[in-house]
Image (spheres, rainbow, N blue to C red):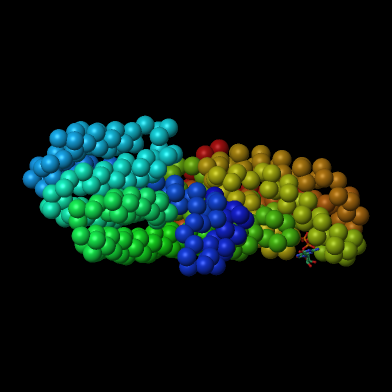
Amino acid sequence: MTEKTSPQLEQELAAADRQPWYQLAFPPLLEQGYQLATGEQRLRRYRLFGAVGIVVFMLYGLVDKFYLADAYDRIWIWRWLILPGMGAAAIIGSYWAPLRRCYELLVVSVSTCCVLALTWFFSLSHMPTAQHYYGGVMLCLVFIMFGLRIPFRLACYSCFISMSYLGWVLLGWHFLDEAIRSLIFILVISSVLLGLLGLFQLEKEARRSYLLAQALQRDHRQLQQGFKQLQQISSIDGLTGLFNRRYFDQQLHKVWDARLHNKAGIALLFVDVDYFKKYNDSQGHQMGDDALIRVAQVIGRHAQPAHGCAARYGGEEFVLLLANCSVGQATRLAEQLRQDVEALGLPHPSSLCSQVVTISIGIAVAHASINQKPDWLVSTADAAVYQAKKHGRNRIVTMHSCQPLPN
Ligand SMILES: Nc1nc2c(ncn2[C@@H]2O[C@H](COP(=O)(O)OP(=O)(O)OP(=O)(O)O)[C@@H](O)[C@H]2O)c(=O)[nH]1
């Protein structure tokens, strides 16, 4: 079965296509799908980059010893224990399902804490070397944006909080020249703005790719549905709903080829409605159509879809193909079919053989063989039905190949 695109998803795909360039969120159903589709990948990235980030953050502890020597006593515990511990806890927590819903918030919180801590570290020091620590702040923010690649919206919050605290610290950091402090702030804020712009583009691209993939999947589903409908239309008879001759021909060859090395017999029942021209002439064409539909329904009930098919061969002629069928089984089934049609009791006053609509059935049974073509079944069943007509109609005649057949 091809999966159908839900109308809501269809609408949302169209709406997402018209979204303004600055909008990053999809409509609800699409957004849910996007989060689901990318969730695992993001989680893996947070774990891997988070672990690398923790190691790098701790390595800088060696630098603190020389560059922030006067504040090292207060810093080291944060640098070596508290912040790496928070990071490690967040990574371990990612394996705990209830935490996954708010996991991104946790990642942003921990990484923002690291930026704030870095800013706090150098604000504690009065060594001239401390001013170089703005580079660390920048590095940390770039890592959050392009290493962890957190969502743009959360990155904005993180940058806003970090920049506010940095600005506040720089304002009160009087031992450094005001011009240098302004330069530091401008450098950091401009790199943050450029970073955010890049992150916005990255997220936009990722979302556009997802949208494109969804639209392609939808088109693929629609094509599959259309193809299936076309296949059905091209193989079904419009009046009776049975398969048409085209489909029957294909099935006959398929069944025959599949049983070339099989001992089971293949039976073909050729069914012809008796005196149907007279029925049409007396009852009218519309009634004739109705009678064909009723007869077709009975024939359809005797079909075994897994091993053959029932089809309208043309006009008032039908065929019933039965694989794995002996002469005895085919004859019994044909007799039952004949009786069932008769039992419909469709009045046929102009028939010369009965008061009701009846059928004649020609049966051909054979083993599939490379020395014989499957068309043999059709011509033989046709000849058999001709015999049935000749001998009075409303009867069955069986013919089979000269090779031994199962009874
Ligand atoms: N109502 C209706 N009639 C159809 C349809 N297709 C074919 N027929 C009619 O079926 C009749 C078949 O007539 P014949 O081939 O002479 O066969 P018959 O009258 O049944 O005679 P026997 O087969 O010898 O009993 C023709 O009158 C066709 O017009 C159809 O779709 N609807």
Quadrant in which residue 228 is drawn: bottom right
Residue 147 to residue 285: above or below: above
Picture coordinates of residue 109 (x, y %)?
35, 42
Picture coordinates of residue 281 (x, y %)?
88, 65
Q: Nearer the viewer, residue 75 or 385?
A: 75
Q: Nearer the viewer, residue 343 or 331?
A: 343
Q: Is residue 194 left or right of residue 252?
A: left
Q: How many marks?
A: 0
Picture coordinates of residue 366 (x, y %)?
52, 49
Q: Residue at x 55, y 51 (%)?
A: 28
- The residue at the far left in this view is 66
Is residue 381 shown to the viewer in this render? no
Picture coordinates of residue 354 (x, y %)?
86, 50
Q: Nearer the viewer, residue 200 or 15?
A: 200
Q: Quadrant of the C terminus?
A: top right
Residue 106 to residue 182: above or below: above
Q: Residue at x 42, y 32 (%)?
A: 98
Quadrant in which residue 125 is drawn: top left
Residue 80 to residue 361: above or below: above
Q: Nearer the viewer, residue 332 or 306?
A: 306
Quadrant in which residue 200 is drawn: bottom left
Is residue 83 shown to the viewer in this render? yes
Q: Residue at x 12, y 52 (%)?
A: 129
Q: Residue at x 35, y 61 (%)?
A: 196
